[in-house]
Image (spheres, grey):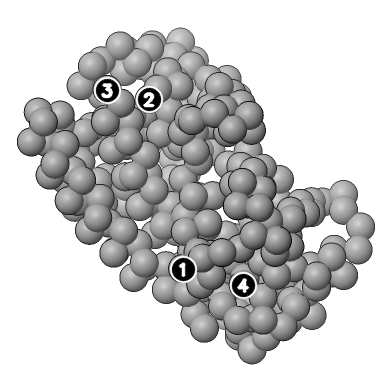
Amino acid sequence: MVIDGRKIAEVFGEQIKERVIKIKKRGIDPHIALINVGDDPASKVYIAKKEKLTASVGISSTVYKFDDDVKENELAKLIEKLNLDEKVHAILLQSPLPKKFQFQKFVDLIDPRKDVDGLTVINQGKLFSGEPGVIPCTPQGVLHLIHSVQENIAGLHSVILGRSIIVGRPLAQLLLNANCTVTILHSYSHNMKSVCQTADILVSAMGKPLFIDGEFVKPGAIVIDVGVNRIEKNGLKKIVGDIVFDDVSKIAAALTPVPNGVGPMTVAYLMHNTLNLAHCH
């Protein structure tokens, strides 16, 4: 079974649209600030997509673009200004930043009550201590896709490849909260293949193109591919995941494609988080 992330995100988007209509009747106009620094081509695409999708559900947005040579204090001043602006409910700092910037340093300048990506140290701490806070978008999207296949996942063994603060670590916490047994694998892990073969739920967020083939996968597993890798094949540029789709689809019970798997759900949860932050305003 192919898990159609685009279709699931569309249904979720309609629910968000209805919530936007209700909150606007209360006189609140949900607004997100999108900050893009540098000329990373993928970042430009992501920002454009986010701008388009926010508009499609009735959420307003403002994009702030900076060149590579922007001074640190300029970026810091903008974040400070947005923190104080009552009309701005959510702030997103698009990653990656140019190498001279420390991403976490600037994320932590964002007011945790406007941290739409849930990446400030305060929101990370709240997630790990079980307190209500903002949860990163991609892990929420991944969990939603898993639940679309199987609602009750208590007791299942989940294996996550990758331990980033954006996906691997917060997703592990969400799966623990759902009463899964969780293993995180990373670049220093041993026996990766044999550990993956024990997974009822396998999530790859490594960023290694076509790394996971059928030999890694337990028959009947739910497999989620978070990887977005740009490769060149026969002179053509192509986007592929971490997983060899044709191979794994013969073994897994359910599998997300790349593109149109996790990506649309990440943006849908960006809308969801923005709306929740506007509600708290």
Closer to the eye: label 2 or 3:
3
Label disc, if present, on residue 114 of the rendered structure = 2
Closer to the eye: label 2 or 4:
4
Mark closest to the chain's N terminus, 2 or 4: 2
Q: Amino acid at mark 1?
A: Ser
Residue 164 or residue 240, whichever sits in front: 164
The reply to whether the C-beta atoms of the residues labelled 1 and 4 are less than 8 Å apart is: no
Mark closest to the chain's N terminus, 2 or 1: 2
Closer to the eye: label 2 or 1:
1
Mark closest to the chain's N terminus, 3 or 4: 4
Q: CA distance from mark 2 to mark 4?
A: 33 Å
The quadrant where residue 263 appears: bottom left
Q: Secondary structure at mark 4?
A: strand
Going by the image, does 10 lie left or right of 111? left
Question: Residue 95 at x, y = what percent?
Answer: 50, 38
Question: Residue 244 at x, y = what percent?
Answer: 65, 77
Question: Residue 162 at x, y = what percent?
Answer: 71, 51
Report which residue position mark 3 lands on: 281
Q: CA distance from mark 2 to mark 3?
A: 9 Å
For the point 25% across and 50% down, which residue is it? 16
Label disc, if present, on residue 148 of the rendered structure = 1
Report which residue position mark 4 lands on: 222
